């Protein structure tokens, strides 16, 4: 294992990343985001999101195209025919840009219909297909059971990115701790990630890198997740030795 890889202590409550849980989290996240979108006025779609360079229409279009990408991966697992998530990164980006220029009604319908198509693809999966290996958009191997987890992340994180009042505190608590385990593992593989010891008031601990030189960052789990994913500056977190939380590399 990479020496910078995260070490999770036994006392850390990470939450079960079972198919039953991830499907539920993805479904709840879709309903949560759909509610936010429904309450947005038409003029809100062109407003900036929390993601640099993207409007809210860009974020919602991305969510719809992500559903189609995950349907491709489910089809790959079910049929054995290699079906990449996206034809190419360039095509993915072009589809988002083009889709963001549609009317709010068209975008709303696309988000709902693509989510419904994904739900149909999930129901079509026979039990053996869930153990089939495919590849994500970055070319990394994954098992089909990981796909609902990817969708759950997309729903809850991009709900925050819409910048219409959602926060990481809206996320189911077990999912937050599972997300922290996932993100710290990814961050621990990055050579430019500083050594960290993350703690929450309930006693959960996540460690990244050489602990002899680690900065301890303490806060509620949703606040830690928001900071790790680059969705906050960490102003509501406490850092060791009075220092502000260190600068982190991009998560993905």
Image (tube, rainbow, N blue to C red):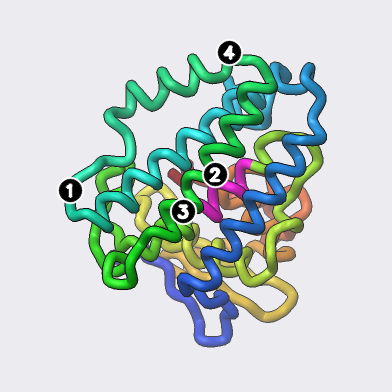
Q: Which region of the structure is painted magenta?
A: 150-158
Q: Residue at x 74, y 75 (%)?
A: 201
Specify the quadrant of the image occupied by residue 147: bottom left
Magenta span includes 153: yes
The secondary structure making up most of the magenta span is: helix
Name the residue carrying label 4.
Answer: 101
The first of marks 2 and 1 along the sequence is: 1
Q: Residue at x 59, y 65 (%)?
A: 24
Q: Residue at x 30, y 63 (%)?
A: 143
Q: Is residue 173 left or right of residue 92?
A: right
**Residue 81 — which label?**
1
**Residue 150 — which label?**
3
User: Residue 87: x percent and y percent?
Assistant: 28, 30
Q: Quadrant of the N terminus?
A: bottom left
Q: Nearer the viewer, mark 3 or mark 2?
A: 2
Name the residue carrying label 2.
Answer: 115
User: Residue 179: x percent and y percent?
Assistant: 55, 62
Q: Can see residue 188?
A: no
């Amino acid at each position: 294992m990479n020496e910078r890889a995260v070490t999770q202590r036994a006392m850390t409550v990470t939450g079960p990343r079972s198919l039953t849980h991830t499907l539920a989290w993805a479904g709840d996240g879709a309903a949560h985001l759909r509610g936010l979108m429904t309450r947005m006025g038409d003029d809100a779609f062109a407003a900036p999101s929390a993601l640099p360079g993207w409007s809210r229409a860009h974020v919602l279009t991305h969510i719809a195209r992500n559903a189609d990408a995950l349907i491709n991966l489910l089809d790959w697992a079910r049929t054995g025919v290699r079906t990449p998530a996206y034809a190419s990164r360039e095509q993915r980006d072009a589809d988002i840009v083009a889709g963001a220029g549609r009317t709010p009604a068209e975008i709303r319908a696309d988000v709902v219909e693509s989510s419904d198509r994904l739900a149909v693809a999930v129901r079509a999966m026979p039990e053996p297909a869930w153990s089939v290996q495919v590849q994500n958009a970055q070319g990394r191997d994954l098992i089909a059971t990981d796909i609902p987890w990817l969708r759950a992340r997309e729903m809850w994180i991009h709900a925050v990115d819409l910048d219409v009042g959602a926060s990481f505190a809206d996320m189911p608590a077990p999912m937050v701790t599972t997300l922290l385990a996932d993100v710290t593992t990814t961050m621990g593989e990055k050579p430019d990630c500083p050594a960290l010891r993350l703690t929450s008031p309930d006693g959960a601990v996540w460690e990244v890198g050489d602990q002899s030189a680690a900065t301890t960052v303490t806060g509620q789990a949703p606040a830690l997740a928001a900071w790790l994913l680059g969705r906050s500056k960490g102003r509501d977190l406490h850092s060791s030795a009075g220092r502000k939380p260190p600068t982190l590399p991009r998560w993905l």
